[in-house]
Image (cartoon, rainbow, N blue to C red):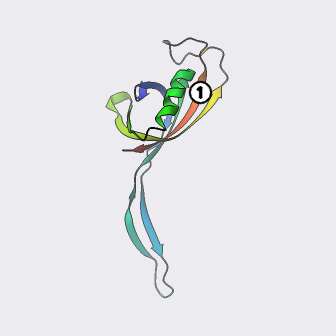
């Protein structure tokens, strides 16, 4: 089971990119010169399903706080992350079966969250 700030989500895809800042200089009379300027904090694009408009509203509110929250998953996975951006799309469903603790008629949303490591 996955949660973000104790809000339950069903993760479909989580990527873990890593990136650094490298400038490439092209002198006229020599080869390429590379200059390392540091690294970019990792941003994790996460795709998930959220059941219920209340949970979706709670997640959206986290994008406006400027506070890092814990993304927790199976096998002890835990990262403190800021929610930079959230996009939700309502999914047509007649009976949701993601969560048994919610009504089968609750709305289901396909959500893309962009998280950055704190």
Is 84 left or right of 39, judged from the image as shown? right
Q: In this rendering, is residue 20 above or below 31?
A: above
Q: Locate the C terminus by quadrant.
A: top left
Quarter holding residue 66: top left
Q: In this rendering, is residue 45 above or below 8?
A: below
Q: Residue at x 67, y 23 (%)?
A: 92
Quarter holding residue 93: top right
Residue farthest toward the front in the current orientation of the protein: 65
> Residue 95, image x and y in percent?
62, 14
Nearer to us in this view, 63 or 103: 63
Residue farthest toward the left in the current orientation of the protein: 76
Q: Secondary structure at mark 1?
A: strand
Q: Say few, some or many: other residues with alpha carbon within 10 Å of mark 1 (under 14 / 14 to 19 / 20 or more).
A: many
> Residue 49, image x and y in percent?
54, 27
Count of numbered circles on the image: 1
The residue that label 1 is drawn on is 109
Q: Residue at x 61, y 20 (%)?
A: 107
Residue farthest toward the bottom in the current orientation of the protein: 29
Is 51 left or right of 70, judged from the image as shown? right
> Residue 24, image x and y in percent?
47, 72
Q: Locate the N terminus by quadrant.
A: top left
Q: Residue at x 37, y 28 (%)?
A: 74
């Amino acid at each position: 089971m996955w949660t973000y700030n104790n809000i339950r989500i069903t993760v479909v895809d989580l990527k873990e990119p890593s990136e650094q800042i490298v400038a490439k200089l092209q002198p006229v009379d020599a080869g390429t010169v590379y200059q390392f300027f540091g690294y970019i904090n990792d941003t994790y694009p996460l795709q998930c399903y959220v059941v219920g408009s209340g949970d979706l509203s709670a997640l959206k509110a986290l994008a406006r706080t400027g506070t890092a929250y814990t993304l927790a998953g199976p096998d002890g996975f835990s990262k403190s992350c800021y929610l930079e951006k959230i996009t939700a799309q309502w999914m047509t469903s007649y009976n949701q079966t993601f969560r048994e603790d919610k009504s089968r008629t609750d709305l289901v949303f396909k959500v893309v969250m962009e998280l950055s490591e704190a």
